[in-house]
Amino acid sequence: MKKAEYAAENFVPEESRKSFLEAMNSIAKLASAGKADSSGNMGYGVAKGRYLGHGSGLVRTTSALDMMRTMDQDAYAEYQKIGKNDDGGLSALKYLTNWYADAVKKNPLLVDNYEKQSEKYVEKNVKDQKLDKTFADLKTGSKAAFFESLKKFRLFLE
């Protein structure tokens, strides 16, 4: 966050600083709420929003694949196995399509439940996330002050 504060104070127009820092704070909270899996890949509990269309006609879509991963882990494990087939992903696409069609027939509220679960995750794990304060005392008013405070911090660690 200190680098973002430095950038805001030195490169972002004054009228945009507040919204820039709010966005950076949200990103930092989401990143710190993430968890690494056994392969080192980060998971953040929510899928990145996707949109169809352009301009003012954008429509947000729901990721069926993330919904499968979140709501039906056995089906997702099977999907991953099928994805290793040497058919250019065709069998995985067919599996995902069939899973989705069957899942929403069985539970017409599946998409709504998934989206509510994602919203709850953000409320619980992201919005109140406490950010690390290790660099809280770094000065961000100028490049020289920023680097000088970094040097002092480094000396403090040694």
Image (cartoon, helix red, strand yellow):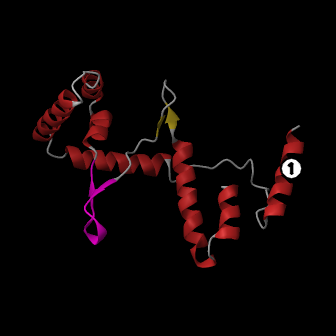
Residue at the spot 31% in from the left edge and 50% down from the top edge: 116
Left or right, 33 with respect to 3, comes to: left
Left or right, 124 with respect to 24, comes to: left
Asked whether 140 or 143 is in front, the reply is 143
**Which quadrant does the N terminus fall into?**
bottom right
Residue 50 location in percent, x, y?
32, 53
Residue at the spot 41% in from the left edge and 46% down from the top edge: 121
Query: Badge 1, how many Cα within 10 Å: few under 14, some, many 20+?
Result: few
Asked whether 58 falls inside the magenta stretch, the response is: yes
Left or right, 18 with respect to 74, comes to: right
**From this viewpoint, is residue 128 visible?**
no
Asked whether 89 or 123 is in front, the reply is 89
Residue 49 location in percent, x, y?
35, 52
Instruction: Determine the image quadrant of residue 32.
Output: top right
**Which quadrant does the C terminus fall into?**
top right
Vertical side of 119 occupied by 145: above or below: below
Asked whether 34 or 149 is in front, the reply is 149
Residue occupying the far bottom of the picture: 15
Say which residue label 1 marks. Answer: 151
- The magenta stretch spans which residues? 50-62
Residue 73 location in percent, x, y?
30, 28
Q: How many labels does the image show?
A: 1
Residue at the spot 82% in from the left edge and 51% down from the top edge: 150
**From this viewpoint, is residue 62 visible?**
yes
Vertical side of 51 occupied by 57: above or below: below
Asked whether 144 falls inside the magenta stretch, the response is: no
Amino acid at dot 1: Lys
Residue 88 location in percent, x, y?
24, 29
- Is disc 1 placed on a helix, strand or loop? helix
Vertical side of 154 occupied by 95: above or below: above
